[in-house]
Image (cartoon, grey):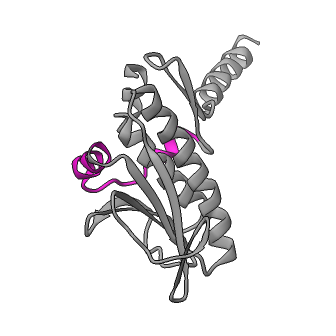
Amino acid sequence: MKMKYSKLLILLVLVSACTQTEIKELFVTSHNTVYTFSYDVREALKVPVENSDQIIRTFAENSEITLVFNGTSGSDNAIFAVTSFNIVSNVGQYFKNEGIPVYFDVKYFVNDTWYNKTGPHDPDLSGTVIWLKGPATGAQRTAVYMNNGHIFVEGTDSKNVILAGDRLFLLLIGINKFEDIGNR
């Protein structure tokens, strides 16, 4: 009888050690604000980041942020809507709490025509430019990186695009590994 309870206890300990509660919210005490994520923050932290110092410097130097994407894929456009919302809400709130005004714009192209919220226009890609790339619009990998002065948030499927967007925000607030979470 004693042996049965010992095995059960060991099994319960192993099962509880293997299950983790998802972390989809982070409370930043200095801001008294909860930042929300679509997926577990630990998954977002697995997304590779290249040129992290340059990405952070780009945000510090430019208060105008433009999200850019190829608008030819309805499925990628849906992913970009979620990713853009997450970036704009989290980054906007974070910089507001830091006392830094930021301005967002969204631009996309279909074939050779560029659009923004008012309709067709000539593209002006200045300031902080974030290119979103999904599985149907050229993503080759899942990563956050710089190329030719622009930031790329790229994912090979819908979840990975969203995770890459979350990873960008985590980079901006100084969270690069799970242990950094307690320091915010």
How far across and down, in percent of the image, does residue 113 sit? 53, 85
Rendering coords of residue 40 (x, y %): 57, 40
Residue 81 left/right relative to 179:
right
Is residue 55 found inside the magenta-colored segment of the image?
yes
Nearest the eye: 35 or 64: 64
Is 27 located above or below residue 101 in the figure? above
* Above/below status of 44 relative to 27: below
Residue at 61% x, 81% y: name it: 72
Residue 149 inside the magenta-drawn segment: no
Residue 9, visible in the rendered structure: yes
**Residue range of the region highlighted in magenta in the rendering:** 40-60
Check the picture and name the quadrant holding the N terminus: top right
Nearest the viewer among 71 and 42 is: 71
In this view, the residue farthest toward the top is: 2
Specify the principal SS of the magenta part: helix
Query: Does the image show residue 23?
Result: no
Judging depth in this view, the residue of 60 and 19 nearest the camera is: 60
Toward the bottom, the furthest residue is 112
Position in image of residue 42 (x %, y %): 49, 39
- Give the percent coordinates (x, y) of residue 104: 49, 51
Q: Is residue 173 left or right of residue 51?
A: right
